[in-house]
Amino acid sequence: MIHTDFFRTREDNVNLYKTYSDLGVKIKQEQTGAEYDEAIDVENSGYTYIETDIPVEDIEISDAEALAIIMGGEYNESN
């Protein structure tokens, strides 16, 4: 089942929400066809997701890399 939960509020007071599958499979954004392990979107983005049959891979990333992804920037290891 697809779940969407409050994730956090950015410094500019924009609320972020995390969408994921509780079945351990990737989700697919219906508007773009992009597939994600989990998606972080701004409040009221209008994006909708469906579950795929593709298992989520266990990949670990650093907190800094995750923050860069969430904030829409690029991760640079030298920072």
Image (tube, rainbow, N blue to C red):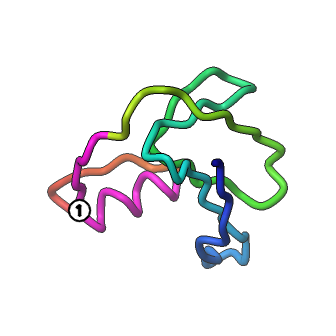
Instruction: Name the residue located 50 percent from the left edge and 57 percent from the top edge.
Output: 70
Q: Is residue 8 above or below residue 69?
A: below
Q: For residue 31, what is the image quadrant? A: top right
Expressed as whole percent of the image width and height from the top left, the position of residue 6 reads 67, 72
- Please tell me which residue lies in front, 54 or 19: 54
Quadrant in which the C terminus appears: bottom left
Q: For residue 9, what is the image quadrant? A: bottom right
Give the total number of marks visible in the rendering.
1
Read off the residue under disc 1: 62
Q: Is residue 37 above or below residue 50?
A: below
- Determine the secondary structure under disc 1: loop
Instruction: Name the residue located 61 percent from the left edge and 74 percent from the top edge.
Output: 10
Instruction: Name the residue located 29 percent from the left edge and 68 percent from the top edge.
Output: 63
Q: Which residues are magenta?
A: 57-71
Q: Is residue 55 left or right of residue 53?
A: left
Q: Residues within 10 Å of mark 1 (few under 14, many from 20)?
A: few
Q: Is residue 12 left or right of residue 73?
A: right
Q: Is residue 43 above or below residue 27?
A: below
Q: Amino acid at mark 1?
A: Ser
Q: Is residue 55 left or right of residue 72?
A: left
Expressed as whole percent of the image width and height from the top left, the position of residue 43 reads 78, 61
Residue furthest to the top: 33
Expressed as whole percent of the image width and height from the top left, the position of residue 21 reads 55, 48
- Please tell me which residue lies in front, 36 or 66: 36
Q: Is residue 78 left or right of residue 33?
A: left
